[in-house]
Image: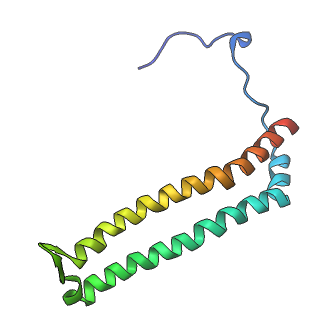
Amino acid sequence: MTTDAPPPPESARTTGPAQPTTESFTRMQQSTEFGELRRTYRSFAFPLTVAFIAWYLLYVLLSSYAGGFMGTKLFGNINVALVFGLAQFATTFLIAWFYSRHAAAKLDPKAEAIKSRMEADA
């Protein structure tokens, strides 16, 4: 759908925050404050990613090579493979929840401080 209406006049346009220059982005990227933000993110994300991939590969390898173990009935028609498979979903949601809490507590305040400082400098 297109519109034939002209753009609003210059005076009616809302102005957003000032846009930082390329030099200020480069300066901020090289700052210790930004480096600390990256370290905080990486110290959380990388170990958790490695742990989840290891957990997933364990599930795949057990499913491929330990069929007897994975087929062990726990109760009724529920076996170890089903429990491990459902645990994969639970782990995914748990990691997402854990990350959102970590980001809100540790990453977002630092990122907001960097953002406001860059907008003020622009």
Q: Nearer the viewer, residue 17 or 99?
A: 99
In screen coordinates, is 77 left or right of 55?
left
> Does residue 6 lie above or below 20 as drawn?
above
Q: Quadrant of the N terminus?
A: top left
Give the farthest residue toward the front: 75
Q: Nearer the viewer, residue 25 or 40?
A: 40
> Which quadrant would residue 37 be assigned to in this image?
bottom right
Residue 53 position within the rendered picture, expressed as x and y whole percent measured from the top left:
45, 75
Q: What residue lies at 83% left-to-right and 42% top-to-bottom?
A: 117
Display coloring:
rainbow
Q: What residue lies at 73% left-to-right and 44% top-to-bottom?
A: 112
In screen coordinates, is 5 left or right of 69?
right
- The answer, for residue 51, to whether it is visible in the render is yes
In this rendering, the count of numbered labels is 0
In screen coordinates, is 103 left or right of 80?
right
> Does residue 70 lie above or below 93 as drawn?
below
Q: What residue lies at 61% left-to-right and 57% top-to-bottom?
A: 102
Q: Quadrant of the C terminus?
A: top right
- The answer, for residue 122, to whether it is visible in the render is no
Residue 60 position within the rendered picture, expressed as x and y whole percent measured from the top left:
32, 80
Residue 105 position within the rendered picture, expressed as x and y whole percent measured from the top left:
65, 52
Residue 42 position within the rendered picture, expressed as x and y whole percent measured from the top left:
65, 67
In screen coordinates, is 118 left or right of 8?
right
Give the farthest residue toward the left: 76
Q: What residue lies at 85% left-to-right and 36% top-to-bottom?
A: 120
> Does residue 36 lie above or below 111 as drawn?
below
> Which quadrant would residue 64 be assigned to in this image?
bottom left
